[in-house]
Amino acid sequence: MTKKLLIILGIVAAVVAIPLLQALLGGGAAVEVQVEKLAPRSIQSSVLASGHLVHEEEVKLSTEEIGKVTAIYVEEGDHVTAGQLLLQIDDQRLRAAVEQNEATVRVQEIAIQRQQLQVNNLRTQWERMRGLHERNLIDEDSFVTATNNLEIAEVDLRSSRESLSQSRAQLEQAQDRLSKTRAYSPIDGTVTSLDIKVGETAISSSTNIPGSSLMTIANPESIHTEVNVDEADIASVEVGQRARVYAIAYADDPVEGVVDSIAVSAKVAEGAQGLSFAVKIRILEPEKITLRPGMSCRAEIFTATKEAVLAAPIQAIVVEEDLTLDETQRYAFVNRNGTAERVEVQVGLSDDTYQEITSGLSEGDEVIIGPDRVLRALEDGDRVVVSEPE
């Protein structure tokens, strides 16, 4: 009986002692984890924004004269130079008006010549009669009449000169209207759209109705993107910062750019609810791919860069917040010879994948980065085994 009792007590002691011993020695099944050795790397903090491509130098041609288009000298896609004739509107009526005003000016000039001769003759007569009047050889009435005739002729001459100025002004107006029947390119660029055809009527209007727009000319080298940056991120965006632009049509071929300007006031972007600021990004290599205005795009604006800083994958940083004390603690787990050690860390700059570590870890530390379900349940002192990368 005593022997059996001793055996039973031994079994019970073993059952109780073994788990205790395993707990004391860090026993329990080891969990598989993925690790990454800390090493210096470049960190680029960025802001993402979306928008569209536009031309900085773009001109939409319209007309101030109503008339039928008689000739178009370019086609869509043609390269044009400043001052090149692009389009002609029927000018027969206005050309006739110019000729009529030119004739009126010539008539006025001839009339002035005749009146000038008359004034000269009357002045000569008046000079002669004045001498006779001084010698009392003619009566007072004859001298007064000669004086009045000279003054009337001089007034008529001044009136004719004013009429000539008026006629010349009317001629300039007619010539100006005639010149507006021809459309010239104001810039060097490319015809991006041709909105009218020969035979259609060009209409003078500021509204977007058929015939009011003739064509659009843009400088392809002036293409840039306008993106809307959320007001929460605008404080970190500055003119001159480098950016990477992804056009929707070329999602795998980004082009480099630089922030050119930032709007001074916020607005509600189309399709959005919150406030945002319009940011212009100049494309540095517009010839790299075929960019067209109106294309949707997204931009990554690099707001800060640090080279050769110690950084850990973002998923390795565990964040704990104490709302009652308004405190935030960040820590990471490090593999120390098969044991998970919880280490509090201080962080700095981050990008999409890595977070700068300013204190708490050293180069070469094996930081546990996953799996996520294991990392969430991991405790300080747990046994771990590093799984082989797939």
Image (tube, grey):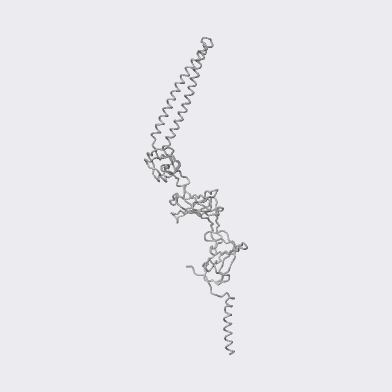
Relative image position of residue 280 (x, y in whole percent) = 51, 49
Would you identify the image quadrant in which residue 306 lies?
bottom right
Relative image position of residue 329 (x, y in whole percent) = 60, 63
Relative image position of residue 126 (x, y in whole percent) = 50, 15
Q: Relative to residue 282, is residue 114 depicted above or below?
A: above
Q: Is residue 363 left or right of residue 295?
A: right
Q: Relative to residue 317, is residue 177 depicted above or below?
A: above
Q: Residue furthest right?
A: 325
Would you identify the image quadrant in which residue 252 lies?
bottom left
Q: Residue furthest left?
A: 199
Front residue of 337/196: it is: 196
Q: Is residue 379 left or right of residue 69?
A: right
Quadrant (top left, top right, bottom left, bottom right) of the N terminus = bottom right
Would you identify the image quadrant in which residue 10 lies?
bottom right
Q: Relative to residue 329, is residue 132 depicted above or below?
A: above
Q: How many marks?
A: 0
Relative image position of residue 310 (x, y in whole percent) = 56, 61
Front residue of 107/298: it is: 107
